[in-house]
């Protein structure tokens, strides 16, 4: 069984650009959450989607948006990138209680 | 109230020793407490988890101790090995009004096990 897959694994963008990160959850899981992890810190909650509806939003600016597709995969979009957006972006897939993470997308903004 | 406080920030243990990482929470609505292990460049991997109706859970060399009255829980790694060197995160989760579980993570403990 495939785990949570994220793409791309690494990404370098310039300030002001836009980025799209993708996540495919574990088969059968309907909930996808996005987290930002800055080096040396724990994951910070960005969004949660369940059955294609937003079920939670963390304390992030409107430059961050997400959506979930009918096959439960998800995209995280970040507009007008800032240097401070450089981080590991993690996607977590949940069936019920347990959350399983992908390997993350390392975003570097220069 | 939504914070999970984790300590220590870093830990160095000799091979074969016991590693102990502690977490504390405030919100009594939390009802699921997982621990994650993260290696550099990788996503966090679920290690072991506990619910507040039990005081201890053991899986191999990993044990969670849970003190509901003190609102604290800890991870014990017995017979620590160099391969256990990683960053460990505690988390607390509750079933939110949105119909899904919400997770709050601790700040992490960087464990180094010396050979």
Image (cartoon, coloured by chain):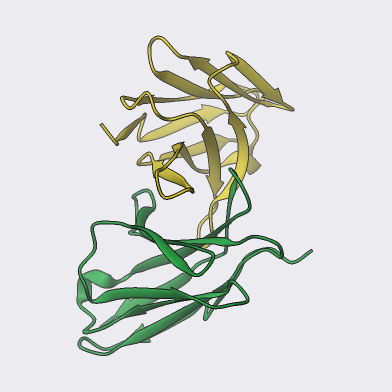
Residue B26 at x, y = what percent?
31, 24
Residue sitting at the far top: B69
Residue at the image point whose x is 46% and y is 31% from the top:
B12
The chain that appears green in the image is A
In the displayed structure, A15 sits above or below A3; it is below
**Chain B, hue in figure:** yellow
Side of B78 where A52 appears, left or right: left
Residue A6: x %, y % from top left = 56, 73
Q: What residue is drawn where x is 44% and y is 37%?
A: B94
The image quarter containing residue A45 is bottom left
Instruction: Name which residue lies at 52% across and 28% down.
Output: B13
Front residue (pair A28, B109): A28
Which quarter of the figure is the N terminus of chain B placed in? top left
The quarter holding residue A51 reads: bottom right
* Residue B99 pos. (x, y %): 47, 48
Question: Is residue B50 left or right of B90 when viewed as pictured?
Answer: right
């Amino acid at each position: 069984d495939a785990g949570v897959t994220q793409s791309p694994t690494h990404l370098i963008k310039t300030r002001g650009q836009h980025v799209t990160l993708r996540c495919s959850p574990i088969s059968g899981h309907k909930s996808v959450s996005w987290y930002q992890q800055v080096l040396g810190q724990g994951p910070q909650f960005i969004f949660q989607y369940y059955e294609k509806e937003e079920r939670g939003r963390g304390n992030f600016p409107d430059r961050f948006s997400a959506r979930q597709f009918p096959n439960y995969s998800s995209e995280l979009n970040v507009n007008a990138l800032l240097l401070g957006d450089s981080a590991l972006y993690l996607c977590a897939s949940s069936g019920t209680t347990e959350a399983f993470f992908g390997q993350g997308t390392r975003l570097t903004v220069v | 109230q939504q914070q999970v406080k984790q300590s220590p920030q870093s830990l160095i243990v000799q091979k074969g020793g016991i590693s102990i990482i502690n977490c504390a929470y405030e919100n009594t609505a939390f009802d699921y407490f997982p621990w994650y292990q993260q290696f550099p460049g990788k996503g966090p991997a679920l290690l072991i988890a506990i619910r507040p109706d039990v005081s201890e859970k053991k899986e191999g060399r990993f044990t969670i101790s849970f003190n509901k009255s003190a609102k604290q829980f800890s991870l014990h790694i017995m017979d620590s090995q160099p391969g256990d060197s990683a960053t460990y995160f505690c988390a607390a989760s509750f079933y939110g009004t949105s119909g899904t579980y919400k997770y709050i993570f601790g700040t992490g403990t960087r464990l180094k096990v010396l050979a």
